Amino acid sequence: MHRDLSQTIGSLFMVGIPGSELDGPTREFLSEIRPCGVILFSRNIESPRQVAELNRDLQKFAVSINIDPLFISVDQEGGRVRRLREPFSAFPSSWEMATSHNPDSTVRNFAQQTALELRLAGFNMDFVPALDVVSELVDLKSTVIGDRSFGSDPERVAHFGNIVISEMRSHGVIPCAKHFPGHGATTVDSHFDLPVDGRSLEDLTKRDLIPFQSAVQNNVEMIMTAHVLFSDIDSAFPATMSEQILYGLLRKTMKYRGIVITDDLDMGAVSKKYSTEKCVIESFRAGADILLICNSSDKATEALSTLKRAFSDGVISNKRLLNSTSRIRHLKQSFSQSFQPCDPEQLLSEMSR
């Protein structure tokens, strides 16, 4: 395999890093993987200055090892899922925003303010909106998505989701709609085990797919998969690893042209049931462009070796690799301003106003 092709394979990965600074082991890890991006969690974030300095250093480091500028992503949804705590702005959950006195204004304000703060802190991607439609048949608190959803009306979920997508985009932050084709009817938490949803494609089309189809029409830049087994559509693999769902349904039927990213391949839903090798090869073969590995550097290293071997052995074609890498590069080019290293002093100046 050519060296340049081998190096390119790393750009199919987005990875987590262990600490709050770009230390030696983290530099070594990123140099080995050569990923398209990183995702930050609470463990990486201590203060506005610290996180802005980390993000600045990450972008400068990418240049120094001769890879494209990094996606620097975070889950900043509002409510219980927000990695950036005060003094960054705090917003209620999607459910609360959608049921507020003036929901359009509330959701728009959340997206605008969050995007502005993320950009100042050096982020260029937020894993929002959650387009999962919560089932009316289950108790809100018993579903894993619960108040992370905008509601149980698919049209309203689509409407608020598109406000978030458009506002994030217009403020230089890449949005990512999740969790395709819908995680709102399950009670099992995919962080720990594999949820099963036995509904038919017809049922999903009438309900869960409506917000995603609307987001596709709004040219959403990225869609994240659900670690849910839709047994009536594909009894062998969860959506993340299902060619019927990612290629057949999302790409062919729904005409999606953007990037598909997996949910975290460290999560119990897939890691308990499938080997790293199986997860990586089946997810990529199914149609995922970016493989997300949030916690284990060893797993990321193993996944990279697995994918390199699959290309070397002809299990996955050069064309398939180039399809994904060209989508990734195109998205980075279209948001090029958002990949410049941030200035921590500017963030602190804005936050002190």
Image (spheres, rainbow, N blue to C red):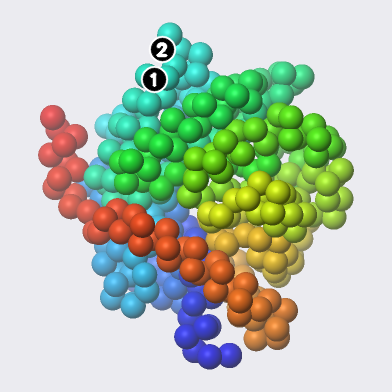
User: In the image, residue 168 lies at what x, y percent?
Assistant: 38, 39
- Residue at 65% over, 54% down: 251
Task: Quote the CA–CA distance across marks 2 and 1.
Answer: 6 Å
| Amino acid type, residue under disc 1 in the picture | Thr
- Residue at 38% over, 26% down: 108
Q: Residues within 10 Å of mark 2 (few under 14, many from 20)?
A: few
Pointer 2 with pointer 1, Cβ within 8 A? yes
- Residue at 33% over, 78% down: 66
Q: Residues within 10 Å of mark 1 (few under 14, many from 20)?
A: some
User: In the image, residue 169 lies at what x, y percent?
Assistant: 37, 43
Q: Image quarter for residue 341?
A: bottom left
Image: 152 above or below 14: above
Q: Please indicate whether residue 234 sits to the left or right of residue 250 in the image.
A: right
Image: 173 above or below 251: above
Instruction: Answer yes or no: is residue 187 visible.
Output: no
Q: Image quarter for residue 57?
A: bottom left
User: In the image, residue 343 lies at what x, y percent?
Assistant: 18, 52
User: Which quadrant of the rendered structure holds the N terminus?
Assistant: bottom right
User: Which quadrant of the rendered structure holds the C terminus?
Assistant: top left
- Residue carrying label 1: 106
Q: Secondary structure at mark 2?
A: loop
Numbered mark located on residue 68 in the image: none
Q: Secondary structure at mark 1?
A: helix
User: In the image, residue 160 lies at what x, y percent?
Assistant: 49, 26
Image: 24 above or below 231: below
Q: Image quarter for residue 189?
A: top right
| Amino acid type, residue under disc 2 in the picture | Asn
Q: Please indicate whether residue 257 sits to the left or right of residue 188 in the image.
A: left
- Residue carrying label 2: 102
Judged from this view, the residue extending furthest toward the top is 101
